[in-house]
Image: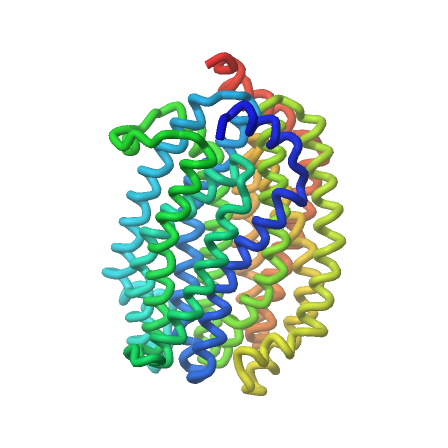
Amino acid sequence: MAYNSHESQMMQKGLFALSWPIFIDLSMHFFSMVINTAMVSSLSLKAVAELNLGSQMFQLAFVIFNFINIGVCVVTAQALGNGNKSIVRRVIHMSLGINIVIGLLLASFGCLGSSIICDIMNIPDDIYDSSKLYLSILSVCFIAEAINLCCSAILRGHGATRDPMYINVAGNILIIFLNYLFLFGSFGAPKLGIYGVALSVVISRFLSIGFLYYLMLKRTGVKIVYRYVFVIKKKILSQLMSIGLPGAGENLTWQLQFLFMTSVVGTFGTIALATQGIYFQMCGIIMLFSISVALGTEILVSHYVGSMNLKMADKQLMHSVKIGIVITSILSVNIPIWLGAAVFSIFTDDPEVLLYAKPIFYVSVVMEVGRILNIIIINSLRAVGDTRFPMYMAILSMWGVSVPVGCFLGIYMQMGLLGVWIGFCADECSRGLIMLARWKSKAWVSRAVKYYKKNYAKLKTA
């Protein structure tokens, strides 16, 4: 695909055209965990708890990969908006090499350091060995996931949001089939239990590499020169990291505080830990909408910044926020309160689990509205180059509000799991209002101008 024609097409794409394929794509990533949990729940509630550590580490790996891939998507879209082909080519080569290295490091850590991770997370003794082995097997797919996420980021930056969606739909269908084979030993396959689930994910992720890589080459029109894959250009790396590091740092802060609070929940017992795992997946259904709108907005705002159209960037962000608040409010009322019991029944029929979860349903109604403000506005601040403020506020709010409030209510006030989620709610709402005030203050405009002059003004004719 030629860059010039793609550039004009990209500017014509609206939020919905970009966001709905991202929603389906992210849904496939999310539902791979839901599918695994639902199928494993047919074995026992204990088996569900055994998956929890692997799922958490998979999400942590996802955040770490975004240290580079957040920047890849944003810089690609900015460069296309600016009409700079050279930057796009360099970003593609460098990002592939960096992701391969990060994937290898994380896979090695997950396999060799599984005992340390289990100890840190206070995994109960009755599921310690099985959780450890499941994590070790699952960690192998981190290599493939790093490459897949890189190719997806490049495709999204070009506005080709449907391609990753198609691959992930096919990947989930494959996971269901392989789970049926290895989890239950169907059609003469070995019955591997939860370890078969890990194997299914590994196989699916590695098969996805070939398809996403091919589509990336086709949509971008870039020919990969392999000797340049591991060549680092300092200016491009600096540009990627100036966006990716603070952006992923904010996400990493969230993931770490969630892991910390999950370790606190682990002290409440296996039932509480299983409830935490199931409930987080239900919340993820609402989060998927928020994230897809945020990423679609980020692509458009990035493109406007590349062409220095800041008025359109502002207009787009406020339009997205209004849509996000309305739809999230509807989802946060209907999914947890009215459909919560039905969703939980998919995973378990244990009445004690539902009893743990019911009070948290009402917390979600407030929490998700705060979260939508955070996700959409933070992504757009990142796109205009105002990246440090969201990261600093994340550190301050998560470790200064979420963790202290959650620990105080959950442990000291003996509210258990409910207290932990009230802490999450307090963080999301307070930080969401701060992000909205930040955008409305227009403090980001001067940063966007400075960012443009540094990275694109002198390269317009490059």
Q: Is residue 41 left or right of residue 20?
A: left
Residue drawn at 62 percent across, 22 percent down:
308
Q: How many marks?
A: 0
Does 192 appear above or below 442? below
- Image x and y of residue 272, in percent: 50, 77
Q: Nearer the viewer, residue 67 or 90?
A: 90
**Quadrant position of residue 417:** bottom right
Q: Nearer the viewer, residue 1 or 446?
A: 1
Front-lying residue, 394 or 174: 174
Residue shown at the point (38%, 66%) measured from the top left = 54
User: Is residue 270 placed above or below 284 in the rendered structure?
Assistant: below
Way the structure is coloured: rainbow
Residue 408 visible at all = no
Quadrant of res 235: top left
Q: Is residue 427 left or right of residue 347?
A: right
Q: Is residue 135 left or right of residue 335?
A: left
The image position of residue 303, as x and y in percent, is: 59, 30
Q: Residue at 54% of width from left, 28% of height from top? A: 78
Residue 221 x %, y %: 43, 30
Measured from the top left, where is residue 3 in percent x and y? 51, 26
Using the rendered image of the protein, determine whether residue 7 is visible from the camera's viewpoint: yes
